[in-house]
Image: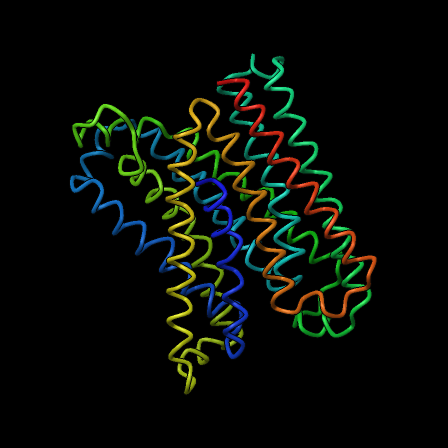
Amino acid sequence: MAVISGMLDGSYGAVMKLTKKWEWENIWLLFSIISLVIFPLILALWAVPNLMDVYRDVETAVLWRTFLLGVGWGVGSVFFGLGLYMLGQSFAYTVMMGIIAVGGSLIPMLVTNPGSVLTVGGILIILAMVVTIYGVTLCGTAGKLRDDHSQEHQIERKTKHSFKAAFMVCLGGGIFSCMFNLAFHFAPPIAVAAANQLGDLSTSFRSNSPIWALVLLGGFIPNFVYCVYLLITKGTWKKFTQPKIGNYWLFGILMGAIFSADVTIYGIAALKFGKLGTTVAWIIYITAGILIANFWGVITGEWEKASPKATQRMIQGCWVLVVSIVLVNIGDLLLS
């Protein structure tokens, strides 16, 4: 399930390539409304009919922490979307998710079970993080080689920013996006309150739904503010009224559906992995996402003009990431 959720996460961004008459802010605003507000709220109300009673039963400090971590993730989400737009699906996704993999998995592990770091299983999980960084480095250098080699790709990015500036956007996207997993990791009281409302002593994806609704609502605010700012200052809101773009709205809904499914399935996978679920499932989730994002990058022609050296480097990086999945699973088995 962690692999499936990662594959979904690595796929929704590819849909943006189908909305060429729109700017980034057009499709991203629609995607944000669908995936961060409408779908999570519908799911939470279906899963826990007395949703507001759940929030009333939880300490205010816990709710604010979860919400604010969601806002922080939302800032990262803005950078994330811009990074995909500026540098392409395969390279930008790989760099950002590599950063997210380490930050989002190491902190929960150190907080939840610091003693596990000194065990064989814990050492293997740490090693998997190091291997992930190495794999991301290989993929990142491959993307830089591709970018330098292909003048055509530079034009397709539709940006006047340098590679260095675009890379800094990706760096911000990776750092802030770690808060997504941290918000889920530090919000068990919400799931417990929901489980009590449902009369179910064990947490499940239904009792996790109020967490996601709150986290994603926090994440919606930065996305909404920045997209509206761009739509007004650039005048791109007019592109919503262009003729023959009815299918673009469907693409936005599709993006939102894919993202909502990936979040829900990830939550289930993290529960199934037990105490270190937000560490182990997170690494698998991120790695699977990186691999499938590179697959879509190849399918959509991002690597057509790349040099053989760049392509070979990307393939090596992907194999290294596969090794990291194997290591983290072995480590989890030894700890369980």
Outermost residue on the bottom side: it is 243
Q: Quadrant of residue 39?
A: bottom left
Count of numbered marks: 0
Q: Position of residue 144 (x, y in %)?
A: 77, 57
The type of colouring in the image is: rainbow
Q: Is residue 297 above or below residue 182?
A: below
Q: Position of residue 241 (x, y in %)?
A: 40, 82
- The reply, left or right, for residue 122 in relation to residue 256 is right
Residue in the picture at 75% in, 62% down: 162
Residue in the picture at 48% in, 59% down: 12
- The reply, left or right, for residue 285 in relation to residue 171 is left
Q: Position of residue 197 (x, y in %)?
A: 17, 31
Quadrant (top left, top right, bottom left, bottom right) of the N terminus: top left
- Residue in front for this viewpoint, 17 or 228: 17
Q: Is residue 266 above or below residue 296?
A: above
Q: Position of residue 124 (x, y in %)?
A: 64, 23
Residue in the picture at 78% in, 54% down: 312
Q: Is residue 248 above or below residue 106?
A: below
- The reply, left or right, for residue 177 in relation to residue 244 is right
Residue in the picture at 39% in, 35% down: 66
- The reply, left or right, for residue 196 in relation to residue 98 is left
Q: Quadrant of residue 248?
A: bottom left
